[in-house]
Amino acid sequence: MAEHQLHDDEDEAVDEAKKTQAEAENKTAGAGEDAEDEEYGLSMDKVEAVLNESVDKKHMTPQMRRIVQRQEENTRRVEDTIKSTKANPRWFVPLFVTLMVVGLIWIVVYYIASTRGNVFPIPGIGNWNLAVGFGILLVGFLMTMWWH
């Protein structure tokens, strides 16, 4: 008996979906909707309305109830995780990328200048220019560890 009622409910739902689809086709044919709506015969508003409807749990099997419950729990967990994530300020990534590039340029300039007999970028410190360049580069790389 309950099975017969479930099939009747499913038949009614299918009939209603066909009516909704026919109405949507009439609207899209007359109103010149987007190509996607014409292709599938349903407007996105109708699809979203169906997806947002609450589930009638009295007609579900126990397995389906568990699946829906698990899905709701997973959705809640993901939302909680997203809310608890911390984001870096907007300047963080450009700063550490800039530090790494400046450190690399400092080292390259020192090597090129030293092959020509000059000591650049800072002439008074000599080979310590390599330490300065690697220090700037290291600070940039260390900042990547705190990037969220």
Image (cartoon, rainbow, N blue to C red):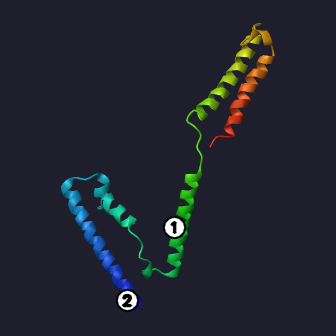
Quarter of the image containing the N terminus? Answer: bottom left
Which one is earlier in the sequence, the residue at label 2 or at label 1? 2
Quarter of the image containing the C terminus? Answer: top right
- As displayed, is residue 61 above or below residue 53? below
Tell me the CA gap for discs 2 and 1.
29 Å
Helix, strand or loop at disc 2?
helix
Residue beneath the point at 69% across and 24% down:
104
The residue at which mark 2 appears reads as 4
**Residue 132 x, y percent position in the rendering:** 75, 21
Label placed on residue 136? none
Amino acid bearing label 2? His
Residue beneath the point at 64% across and 31% down:
96
**Residue 138 x, y percent position in the rendering:** 73, 30
Residue beneath the point at 23% across and 65% down:
23
Furthest-top residue in view?
Answer: 117
**Residue 136 x, y percent position in the rendering:** 71, 25
Furthest-left residue in view?
Answer: 30
Nearer to us: label 2 or label 1: 1
- As displayed, is residue 22 above or below residue 7? above
Dot 1: few (<14), some (14–19), or many (≥20) neighbours within 10 Å?
few
**Residue 82 x, y percent position in the rendering:** 56, 53
User: Could you tell whether 26 is left or right of 99 in the image?
Assistant: left
Label placed on residue 72? 1
Amino acid bearing label 1? Glu
User: Could you tell whether 94 is left or right of 106 in the image?
Assistant: left
